[in-house]
Image (tube, rainbow, N blue to C red):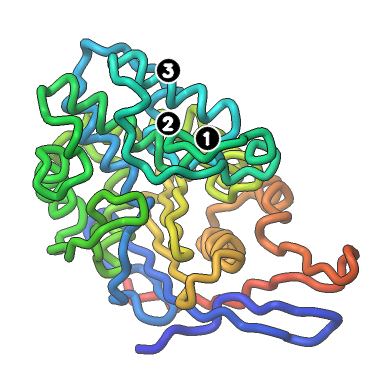
Amino acid sequence: MSPVPLVQVVRSGVVESVHLGDVAVCDASGRLLAHAGDPNRVVFARSCMKPVQAAVSLAAIGTDVRLTDRHVAVMCSSHNGEPSHIGAVRELLARGGVPETALRTPAARPMDPDAAAAVRTPKPVFHDCSGNHAGMLVASCEAGWPLETYRARSHPHHRRMLPLVRALTDAEPVQGVDGCGIPVHALPLRALATMYARLAEPSALPDAPFLARAVEAMRARPYLVGGRGREDTAIMQATPDIVAKEGAEALNCAFSSGAGIGIAVKVADGGYRAVGPATIAVLDSLGLLTPAARRSLSPWSRPTVLGGARPVGRLEPIVTLSREPA
């Protein structure tokens, strides 16, 4: 199956570009409820795997290191590098007794323009994955695992990830290397949608208390998961029933606790500008957004197209879900 149109870009009344992609909607049993394009498209999970990575870290950390929602949320984050994010990462490292120099994220500037303007020198802590890596380092310190090799596929943290990923997805992942240097898992979209549906109620899964803890922290501190201008933060702030997570190359995953379903949305060309409108449109078509949430999310659901610094058009979601027979 081929990708289908998800979002069109309209400038001065003319459709200028169209982003294609694929969508899967599943319940916790793995049953496909709805789709657009190819729900079996294999994609790298990228940062959509971070709540699971955080759960593995939390299981190794245990209760000796007292962590708040603030610390756990930044472990699940692809953060903007705003002061609140960097403060949480540094607090997390300090609570685990890990020096900032142990971070092996690539040196970077913050994603947030204002935060980046205040930074003279790129550093690993400013990388959007630094909270996730800090969690792995604190886990390694507590468990007696080597710190220097925490990014390696052979490291105990990543060996513990594999059985949990299999349990969450009912699939065998292909492993690659993520942009931040840690292992990344490639899976069918429907497997990722199933994983997120199971995160909504993980009680029957391995590491259930730690998966639940990661999800609770994302709900409690959504700003630390992304930050200013980020659609996963905006979705969680607008709709507390939904937990959402952005991933690189225009992949978004989310679940609704009330509906017990998970979604995975992938823009085929990796066009990040299209994934927010597509994701919000899917959530809305599934009846998961209130009128108030729709209004709150309008800057992300139909972003403005500018001409001469003035609005001349917008991105318009055109995704249509095909429902599966009951």
The reply, left or right, for residue 91 in relation to residue 32 is right
- Give the image location of residue 152, x and y in percent: 17, 47
Query: Disc 3 marks which residue?
Result: 91
Distance Cα–Cα, label 2 vs label 3 = 12 Å
Picture layout, residue 322 above or below residue 299: below
Q: Which mark is residue 73?
A: 2
Task: Give the residue displayed 28% in from the left and 73% down from the top.
Answer: 42
| Secondary structure found at label 1 | helix
Q: Are marks 2 and 1 in contact (CB under 8 Å)?
A: yes
Q: Label 1 amino acid?
A: Pro
Q: Residues within 10 Å of mark 1 (few under 14, many from 20)?
A: many
Element carrying mark 3: helix
Give residue 63's position: percent from left, percent from top.
22, 14
Q: Is residue 4 left or right of residue 18?
A: left
Quadrant in the picture for residue 305:
bottom right
Quarter of the N terminus within the rendering: bottom left
Name the residue rendered at 49%, 27% in the picture. 220
Q: CA distance from mark 2 to mark 1?
A: 7 Å
In this image, 238 relative to 107: left or right?
A: right
- Kindly identify the amino acid type of the residue bearing the numbered disc 2: Ala
Q: Secondary structure at mark 2?
A: helix
Q: Is residue 59 above or below residue 167?
A: above
According to the picture, the residue beneath numbered tag 1 turns out to be 222
Q: Earlier in the sequence, mark 2 or mark 3?
A: 2
